[in-house]
Image: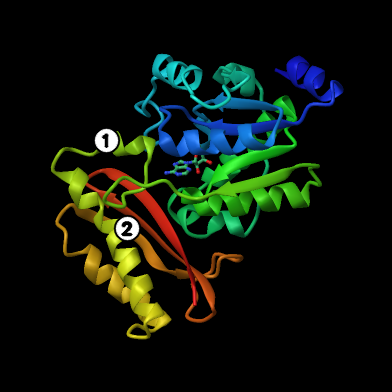
Amino acid sequence: MHRFSRYCRESGKTIGFVPTMGALHEGHISLVNESTKANDITVVSIFINPAQFSEDEDFERYPRDYGGDIRKLRGLPRLPVDALFMPSVSDIYPDGYKTYVEVRGLSERLCGGFRPGHFTGVATVVLKLFNAVMPVRAYFGLKDYQQCVVIKKMVRDLNLDMEIVTCPTLRDHDGLAKSSRNIYLSAEQRPEAALIYRAMAEAREAVKDGTLKIEDIAPRLQETLLKSEAVTEIQYASAYDPRTLKETTEGKRFLIAVAVKIGTTRLIDNLMVEL
Ligand code: AMP
């Protein structure tokens, strides 16, 4: 990978990079399309990163469909991707591996409170992938808003000479954000999961038309989400400062973000609100 990237860069080509964990869906493909539009070379990686899963999470059973992923990337109607990078766990974390990247503060908020160590695992693997791929631009989905903020902070703090491009969330027809984990949902749970988007959109409209105060977003979201028996746990659901990720009750621009469990499946989503 390193040799390929160096060759591209020495030939004056720009590399765009889309890191993924595979089980590719239209959300991933939208990032690939952004990259192929803006760069000479597009590299996609598939690596299910054990360092970002804790013991009790779904690393072992995370969906894997390498054959399907390769077919999807080969079959893209627009420009094809130029390289698919699929390192093994021992390529990334050989025996005795000891170095981790910690983005303090931002990593502990929102999902960080429920997934300790998650963003250290993410920042570490993303930096290692950046070092292998040497992109000019890397593409991330706003569905994982906190991930975007953490990676941008790492890029700034470590003086990486590259741009992080964030891309809008692709949704199913009923609003559910596309996610590799949606396949865990049963036929009964799947329609219920659209409630996450509906609850956020409803709160956003109510704040915009002045019938809901920002400080009442959290209780409104709780109320709406708990109407469904499919929602087994609300980890967080409120309004947050988009830069600090701290809960907020004011501002012209803020993020509504939600993490819930539908049965045993943990889903996250968010919407930006601009008043
Ligand atoms: P993952 O394979 O889940 O690690 O996701 C790889 C990249 O795709 C991340 O930057 C995600 O934010 C992005 N992504 C995942 N789902 C979506 C979606 N529904 N819309 C846009 N981007 C997405």
Q: Which residue occupies 55% across, 70% down?
A: 241
Is label 2 or label 1 in front?
Answer: 2
Q: Is mark 2 within 8 Å of ligand 1?
A: no
Percent across and percent down for residue 3 are: 77, 15
Q: Which amino acid type corresponds to the residue marked 1 in the rendered image?
A: Tyr
* CB atoms of marks 2 and 1 within 8 Å: no
Coloring scheme of the render?
rainbow
Percent across and percent down for residue 265 are: 29, 43
Q: Which amino acid type corresponds to the residue marked 2 in the rendered image?
A: Tyr
Q: In the displayed structure, does residue 131 sit left or right of residue 120?
A: right
Percent across and percent down for residue 177 are: 36, 47
Q: Quadrant of residue 132?
A: top right
Q: Is residue 20 above or below residue 205?
A: above
Q: Is residue 233 above or below residue 219?
A: above
Please give the residue where the numbered disc 2 appears in the rendered image. Answer: 197
Q: In the displayed structure, does residue 94 sit left or right of residue 65?
A: right
Percent across and percent down for residue 190 are: 21, 44
Mark 2 crowd level (few <14, some 14–19, many ≥20, 10 Å Cα): many
Residue 184 is tagged as 1
Residue 142 is tagged as none
Q: Is residue 16 above or below residue 147?
A: above
Q: Secondary structure at mark 1?
A: helix
Q: Which residue occupies 17% across, 52% down?
A: 230
Q: Is residue 209 above or below residue 88?
A: below
